[in-house]
Amino acid sequence: MKNKFLALFLSVVALFSAIALSGCAKRLEVVVGDDGKTESVIFKISANVMEISPDSSVYDYMLALKEDGLFDFTSENSNFGQTILSVNGIENYVAENGLSGKSWMIYTDLTTLDDVVYSNAEYGTYEHDGKTLNSASYGVSGLPCIEGYTFALVYAEWSWN
């Protein structure tokens, strides 16, 4: 009798756990290279992470993800707004001659909103999960936080050569 009760109890707990977890969307995906280092962080804006207002930026959203312990980053204010300096301990790199390096770039499927161009494929694209994301035209603090749009921080090489 105790075994039947325990089995029934565990079944009910498993059912409620499955129902509760089914509503939880994946908050972000971290892509790690063969060297074990973070290559990209992809996230889709969701009101489940933070309360989104018309003034919310992607930077605000990233801070909420950071506060939840989902990934880490550092940034500084620049002429372009918040510039990402590192993600999960991987820092931007500039060659000694200053003509090449690797930096954290932001890509998104948010193209144009209210006649403002927020990304452009001419500046580069990033493919993820069958979706093409365009290079952002603004820094993370200049990009609006709009539910349903996807953003990717990508550690990418650049060159002025």
Image (spheres, grey):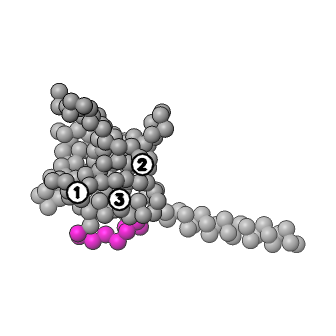
Query: Which of the two discs, 2 and 1, labels the residue nearer the N terminus?
Result: 1
Between 151 and 19, the residue placed more toward the observer is 151
* Label 3 CA crowd tier, 10 Å (few <14, some 14–19, many 20+): many
Q: Which mark is residue 77?
A: 1
Between 125 and 143, the residue placed more toward the observer is 143
In magenta segment, residue 54: yes
Query: Which of the two discs, 3 and 1, labels the residue nearer the N terminus?
Result: 3
Query: Amino acid under label 2?
Result: Asn
Query: Which of the two discs, 3 and 2, labels the residue nearer the N terminus?
Result: 3
Q: Secondary structure at mark 1?
A: strand
- 3 vs 1, front mark: 1
Identify the magenta region.
47-55
Q: Is residue 159 visible?
A: no
* Label 1 CA crowd tier, 10 Å (few <14, some 14–19, many 20+): few
Q: In the rendered image, which quarter is residue 124 located in?
A: top left
Q: Secondary structure at mark 3?
A: helix
Image spot of residue 62 (x, y percent): 35, 59
Image spot of residue 72 (x, y percent): 41, 54
Quadrant where the N terminus is found in the figure: bottom right
- The CA distance from mark 3 to mark 1 is 15 Å
Q: Residue at x 43, y 54 (%)?
A: 71
Helix, strand or loop: magenta stretch? loop
The residue under label 2 is 88
The residue under label 3 is 62
Q: Horizontally, is 2 left or right of 89 in the view? A: right
